[in-house]
Amino acid sequence: MKKITLILLVIILIVVSGCVSQNFENEIYNIEGPTYALPIPEFDGNISLETALESRRSRRNFQDKAISLEQLSQILWAAYGITSPNSNSESRGGLRTTPSAGALYPLEIYVIVGNIENLAPGVYKYISETHEIMRVIDGDIRSELSEAVVNSNMVLEAPITIFYSAIFDRTTDTYGERGRNYVYIELGHSAQNIYLQVETLGLGTVAVGAFTDDEVKRILKLPANETPLYIMPIGYYN
């Protein structure tokens, strides 16, 4: 009888521990809102890589024109989408469009939505593993965010803004302080993917690193372990 009771107690502890762990993960990754599946991305565009490279520029003036969910899907997939799924991998879903030291993928990607067809304004987190977005903040925050950014009109005018943060521990736990360099390198890989992808979609973007970190973190309600890195307004340009 004592043996059965002990076994039941161990099972209960495992279940409770699992629930606590899951809640902790949810808190860390700011997973709290409704989830929306994105359209399947295209893998064969109408513009060659060479043409996209030749035409790539930083665009700073945007039109007041909505972009589509299909365009958003393509941009997010280019930034950090899964290209080789692996449910048993420690790489959190499989290999991606962006190379990552040790396949540890420390970046987190959010979309500040102001004007997308069939999608309410708000802040959405990209879930690479399932190619979905999850709403974490309701409402259009472009005006508030622009106050924390140098050359703020770009964020205010663009229909969407891609925002990058990083969880450095994912990489530094393996590579030590040198891992911080690897995170910044990875950010550059991913951002260049966005630059090239938007060119193929007839859109433009600009990479912005000049902002007030604490204000951006407060406005986006980032978890304590996420560090703001990059802002990329995207839209039809003038």
Image: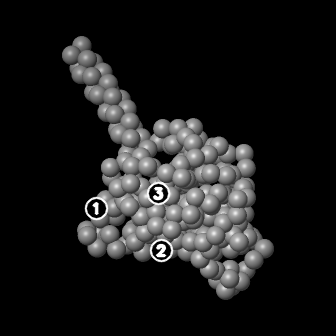
Residue drawn at x 62%, y 46% as measured from the top left: 121
Residue located at (72% from left, 68% from top): 201
Q: Earlier in the sequence, mark 3 or mark 1?
A: 3
Residue 140 percent location from the top left of the image: 58, 47
Residue at 32% across, 49% down: 224
Q: Residue furthest right?
A: 46
How far apart are the alpha carbons under marks 2 and 1?
A: 21 Å
Tag in front: 3 or 1 = 3
- C-alpha separation, residue under disc 3 versus residue under disc 1: 34 Å
The earlier-in-sequence mark between 2 and 1 is 1
Q: Nearer the viewer, residue 86 or 41?
A: 41
The reply to whether callout 2 and callout 1 are in contact (CB within 8 Å) is no
Q: Which residue appears farthest toward the left when viewing the image? A: 2
The residue closer to the viewer here, 135 or 6, is 135
Q: Secondary structure at mark 2?
A: helix
Q: Residue at x 38, y 36 (%)?
A: 23
| Label located before the other in sequence (2 or 3) | 3
**Callout 3: 10 Å neighbours few (<14), some, many (20+)?**
some
Disc 2 versus disc 3: distance between alpha carbons? 25 Å
Q: Amino acid at mark 1?
A: Asp
- What residue did someone put label 2 on? 188
**Kind of residue indicated by mark 2:** Gly
* Left-right relation of 129 to 20: right
Question: Which mark is nearer the camera, 2 or 3?
Answer: 3
The residue to which callout 1 is attached is: 173
The residue to which callout 3 is attached is 147
- Measuring from the top left, give residue 130's x and y in whole percent: 58, 50
**Which element carries disc 1, helix, strand or loop?**
helix
